[in-house]
Image (tube, grey):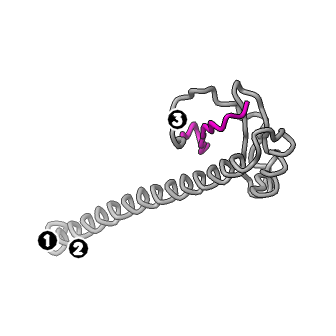
């Protein structure tokens, strides 16, 4: 085949154009799917956080750590669902921390508590932050409990 022929040059240009188009479409699909999955995880995290917030709001202000633990374990089941839930009272008093998840993907004991106010903390409805590969959501509940 003659490398200087018009047919050869057209085939090369067509192959380059097709390769560039596939690379562009693949990149767009990758980032679009990544954004979709991150949004889905953030929404799921917000819903679970709201569920724990509702549990805490329904309990009386005098509820102890055992009642809070029972309510969260019954309605959320964080270990079974491979989730981590921690409830603290000011100033950093641990009320509830979920146990080892069913798939043993992480150890809840090594997750350090977040100091308040932590970077990304929001006083209104909570914020998410992603250190390393974690997705975290923190909510401040001012219900008059001490």
Q: Residue at x 75, y 33 (%)?
A: 110
Q: In the rendered image, which quarter is residue 61 located in?
A: top right
Count of numbered circles on the image: 3
Q: Position of residue 6 (x, y in %)?
A: 12, 72
Label 2: which secondary element: loop
Reading the chain from its start, which is encountered first: label 2 or label 3?
2
Residue identified by numbered label 2: 1
146 relative to 1, above or below: above
138 relative to 89, above or below: below
Residue identified by numbered label 3: 123
Label 3: which secondary element: loop
* Marking on residue 75: none
Check residue 129 for magenta coloring: yes
**In the image, which residues are magenta?**
128-146
Q: Position of residue 119 (x, y in %)?
A: 52, 29
Q: Is residue 130 left or right of residue 25?
A: right
């Amino acid at each position: 085949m003659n490398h200087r022929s018009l047919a050869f040059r057209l085939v090369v240009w067509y192959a380059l154009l097709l390769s560039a188009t596939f690379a562009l479409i693949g990149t767009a699909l990758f980032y679009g799917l990544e954004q979709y999955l991150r949004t889905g995880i953030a929404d799921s995290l917000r819903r679970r956080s709201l569920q724990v917030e509702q549990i805490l709001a329904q309990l009386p202000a005098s509820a102890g750590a055992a009642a809070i633990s029972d309510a969260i374990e019954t309605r959320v089941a964080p270990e079974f669902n491979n989730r981590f839930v921690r409830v603290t009272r000011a100033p950093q008093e641990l009320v509830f921390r979920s146990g080892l998840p069913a798939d043993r993907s992480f150890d809840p004991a090594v997750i350090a508590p977040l100091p308040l106010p932590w970077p990304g903390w929001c006083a209104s409805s909570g914020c998410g932050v992603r250190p390393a590969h974690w997705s975290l959501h923190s909510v401040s509940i001012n219900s008059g409990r001490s």
